Amino acid sequence: MGVIRFENVGRVFGSKAKPFVALKEIDLEVQDKEFVAIVGPSGCGKTTCLRLVAGFDFPSSGKVLVDEKEIRRPGPERAVVFQQFALFPWKTVHDNIELGLRNQNVARSEREDRINSILELMNLTRYAGHFPHQLSGGMQQRVAIARAYVLDPDVLLMDEPFGALDAQTRVVMQEELVRLARKNPRTVLFITHAVEEAVYLADRVVIMTRAPGRIKEVLDVASIRKSENWDSYEKIEDVMDLESFVHLRTHIWRSLREEKAAQTA
Ligand SMILES: Nc1ncnc2c1ncn2[C@@H]1O[C@H](COP(=O)(O)OP(=O)(O)OP(=O)(O)O)[C@@H](O)[C@H]1O
């Protein structure tokens, strides 16, 4: 299972004399194996939301729970993928992927089985002995995703994972993530600045307001994806051409533009 719940969550940074309210009254439930993307203006608290679920930070008020348990620390059932691939440069692809399994004391033969199957799934088998600097950015991010997936987490937390990639590689990675998520569904909380990416990948898109970050709107993409049969299209550009896709994208753009305008007014 992997149900994430934010219950009236607030996060205040700064001092008592000079508080800064980053998050206010966040209520959200992400269902088991649901893919939820969060979009919002810069500084609205997206990363803070993700850090609260990861157990890297704690709410000032309210609660964040995974499977009804309040989060008090990072845990193996929650894996994080950052924008910066954060691979160990002195370790090979194989050894980077192995590290988390070693930390969990998984036996050697099981480690090898799990590493081999994730390498295959992510088309990385022939790069197992390569070091990160020998790989392109897209490949490195693929390794970072493999490293998270191999731990078999209930929850995957992804903070702009494709933000550092060029446009074409980004599209390839988006298509791969969709394939991976279908074969091996997990609960995913995904932060992005790219509206198209959010609509293409997510079951629901959460739009946040400018700071103090609140939830402005939650859009149900999954029902539209199903009724308009998006999954029958193999290529991302074919989905992006559909009227139903364009309509959702434009709606989110408008909503974000309103926030930006209010921010600078
Ligand atoms: N540890 C901290 N101490 C003080 N302020 C913080 C801290 N962490 C985050 N903030 C502030 O809280 C606000 C929300 O930050 P956060 O990184 O969550 O936003 P974001 O929506 O992810 O931004 P971006 O889209 O630019 O990455 C920002 O104004 C940030 O400066």
Image: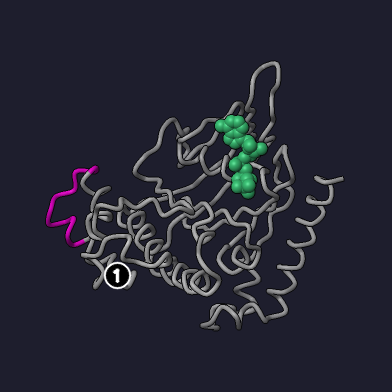
Does 111 appear in magenta? yes
Q: Measured from the top left, where is residue 188 in percent x and y? A: 49, 55
Q: Quadrant of residue 147?
A: bottom left
Residue at 54% of width from left, 78% of height from top? Answer: 231
Q: Quadrant of residue 201?
A: bottom right
Task: Please report the bounds of the magenta region as a residue range.
Answer: 103-113
- Quarter of the rendering containing residue 39: bottom right
Q: Residue furthest right?
A: 265
Q: Is residue 242 left or right of residue 200?
A: right
Extreme-left residue of the structure: 109
The amino acid pointed to by label 1 is Leu
Question: Quadrant for ligand 1?
Answer: top right
- Is residue 187 visible in the rendered structure shown here? yes
Asked which secondary structure carries label 1, the reply is loop
| Image x and y of residue 9, in percent | 62, 34
Q: Is residue 263 left or right of residue 44?
A: right
Instruction: Give the answer, above or below, for where 233 lies relative to 44.
Output: below
Which residue has dot 1 on it? 124
